[in-house]
């Protein structure tokens, strides 16, 4: 069987409710998955939840409940977010699932049997918040950075993975493979981390300190370190250990935030795979942060945006449109509800929603509810069609290079061109004319508006699947499953029925 296009998000951690960062990552990945499917490529899209670790155990102890109860509750929240955002994932993996535990223990046993995991005493510092051991060199001006939270000194026996043996190999791999990390400048962050000698990675926690985890198969007094557990989800979901693994792996893209690129995803994970003789992912797609007034959003500062609130108020596709149009993939972007509402009212309600509303209204008033033929092609129609021909040849390149914000800018420039065309043709005036040529122009205007909305809504499908389907349905068409010849300008809508008049984006007061 041919290789599927495998795309994954970083799995979320079960220590808090979804926020805009979680939503954006899933939407970005979904846009890529939908675009690939529309291009005729078989896709397997995976997201999920990382459920083990000390923070989950501590939260459960504070509430007097079992850790799995917290995980079940948060899994429900994240899966609800996916549903409400129309995320088209093919799999949702939880690291408490039996299928995942089996894979983690299989890999640990393999590495242990090959002498790549050993036991040793450790005396040093431990960050409870990050659930990792830290060293003095990670201090800034003599202080532990705030993101480490409480740092305590501990002494204990643990198991270590020979991470350091692969440092030179990883440096060479990143330098020689310029397409491994996108955008490329993020490679510098990883290489900078690798300038210092790597320590071997502690991959266990004693059960007396942490019981909420996957047991080591070779020593049941210990559980697995959360990253050595969580990162394995990608190959679990790809069917590691089954006949179908080669159909899915290697992943084509891991979509992750810049804060977890190094060391987890770009140091620990590739070295783990190398040690296991498993191919590396083909690419990492690294996105930036959502900021508030130039600073990263923070729970402690009360800046976290609940995406469900905006979805309830404005609709899923409006939220999807905003985050994709506003962020240049790889860079940071600012968020404010004022900016969101401005985009909603101008781009969606005024430009797109008003155009659809006017067309349906005039289609019923002037054409008996039936889309007419394009009867006469004059300069105004040629301008619209030329704009379309230039536009749609650019969009695929922009989608292929993750420049979705530019693709949306181009599509909406065409929608604004359709609005300009409508004003120039003034079909409400043509409808009053007794001139035979004006009657032909009226039919042509309605046909041109319809065709322009048909083709542009197809290009919008990856970003706004629900709205795209509504527009196509209002033109008597079904949702498109493959691009194919569907983007060629044509007269195929003639004779179809206009749908009922509707308001796609009700105006919101500022």
Image (tube, rainbow, N blue to C red):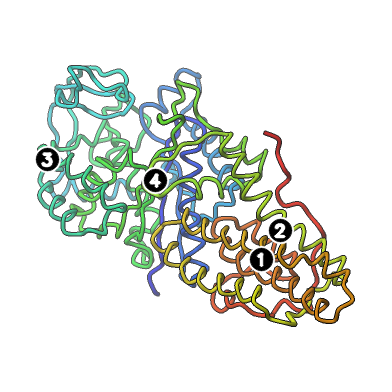
Alpha-carbon span between mark 2 and mark 3: 56 Å
Q: Which residue is mark 4?
A: 10
Q: Residue 66 in the image: x percent, y percent?
A: 48, 27
Mark whose residue sits in front, 2 or 4? 2
Other residues around mark 2 within 10 Å, as few (<14) / some (14–19) / many (≥20): many
Could you say whether the residue bearing mark 4 is in a helix, strand or loop? loop
Could you say whether the residue bearing mark 3 is in a helix, strand or loop? loop
Alpha-carbon span between mark 1 and mark 3: 53 Å
Q: Which residue is mark 2?
A: 355
Mark whose residue sits in front, 1 or 2? 2
Of pointers 1 and 3, the one earlier in the residue sequence: 3
Alpha-carbon span between mark 1 and mark 4: 35 Å
Q: Which mark is residue 297?
A: none
The C terminus - image quarter: top right
Q: Which residue is mark 3?
A: 195
Of pointers 3 and 4, the one earlier in the residue sequence: 4
Q: Residue 148 in the image: x percent, y percent?
A: 29, 24
Instruction: Say which of 218 and 485 sits in front.
Output: 485
Residues at circles 2 and 3 in contact by the CB criterion of under 8 Å:
no
Q: Which mark is residue 453?
A: 1
Mark whose residue sits in front, 1 or 3? 1
Q: Residue at x 79, y 62 (%)?
A: 360
């Amino acid at each position: 069987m041919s290789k599927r296009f495998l795309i994954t998000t970083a799995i979320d951690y079960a220590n808090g409710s979804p926020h805009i960062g979680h939503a954006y990552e899933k939407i970005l990945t979904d846009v890529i998955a939908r675009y690939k499917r529309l291009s005729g490529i078989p896709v397997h899209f995976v997201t999920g939840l990382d459920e083990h670790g000390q923070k989950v155990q501590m939260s459960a102890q504070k509430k007097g409940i079992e850790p799995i109860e917290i995980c079940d509750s948060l899994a429900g929240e994240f899966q609800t977010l996916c549903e409400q955002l129309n995320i088209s994932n093919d799999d949702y993996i939880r690291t408490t699932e039996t299928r995942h535990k089996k894979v983690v223990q299989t890999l640990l046993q393999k590495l242990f049997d090959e002498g790549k995991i050993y036991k040793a005493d450790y005396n040093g510092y431990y960050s409870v918040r990050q659930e990792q051991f830290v060293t003095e060199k990670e201090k800034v001006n003599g202080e532990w950075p705030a993101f480490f939270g409480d740092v305590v000194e501990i002494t204990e026996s643990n198991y270590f993975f020979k991470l350091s043996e692969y440092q030179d190999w990883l440096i060479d791999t990143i330098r020689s493979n310029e397409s491994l990390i996108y955008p490329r400048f993020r490679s510098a962050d990883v290489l900078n981390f690798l300038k210092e000698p790597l320590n071997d990675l502690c991959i266990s926690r004693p059960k007396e300190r942490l019981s909420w985890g996957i047991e080591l198969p070779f020593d049941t007094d210990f559980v697995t370190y959360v990253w050595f557990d969580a990162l394995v989800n990608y190959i679990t979901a790809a069917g590691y250990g089954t006949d179908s693994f080669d159909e899915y792996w290697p992943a084509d893209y891991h979509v992750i935030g810049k804060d977890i690129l190094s060391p987890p995803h770009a140091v620990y994970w590739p070295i783990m795979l190398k040690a296991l003789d498993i191919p590396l992912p083909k690419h990492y797609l690294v996105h930036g942060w959502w900021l508030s007034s130039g600073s990263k959003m923070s729970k402690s500062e009360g800046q976290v945006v609940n995406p469900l609130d905006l979805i309830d108020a404005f609709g899923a596709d409006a939220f999807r449109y905003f985050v994709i149009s506003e962020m240049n993939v790889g860079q940071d972007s600012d968020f404010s509800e004022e900016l969101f509402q401005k985009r909603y009212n101008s781009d969606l309600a005024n430009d797109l929603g008003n155009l659809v509303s006017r067309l349906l209204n005039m289609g019923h008033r002037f054409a008996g509810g039936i889309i007419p033929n394009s009867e006469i092609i004059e300069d105004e129609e040629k301008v619209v069609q030329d704009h379309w021909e230039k536009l749609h040849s650019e969009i695929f390149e922009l989608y292929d290079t993750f420049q979705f914000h530019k693709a949306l800018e181009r599509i909406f420039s065409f929608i604004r061109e359709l609005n300009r065309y409508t004003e120039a043709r003034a079909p409400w005036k043509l409808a009053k004319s007794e001139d035979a040529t004006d009657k032909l122009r009226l039919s042509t205007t309605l046909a041109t508006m319809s065709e322009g909305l048909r083709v542009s809504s197809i290009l919008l499908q990856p970003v706004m699947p629900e709205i795209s389907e509504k527009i196509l349905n209002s033109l008597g068409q079904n949702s498109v499953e493959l691009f194919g010849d569907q983007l060629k300008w044509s007269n195929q809508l003639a004779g179809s029925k206009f749908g009922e008049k509707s308001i796609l984006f009700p105006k919101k007061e500022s």
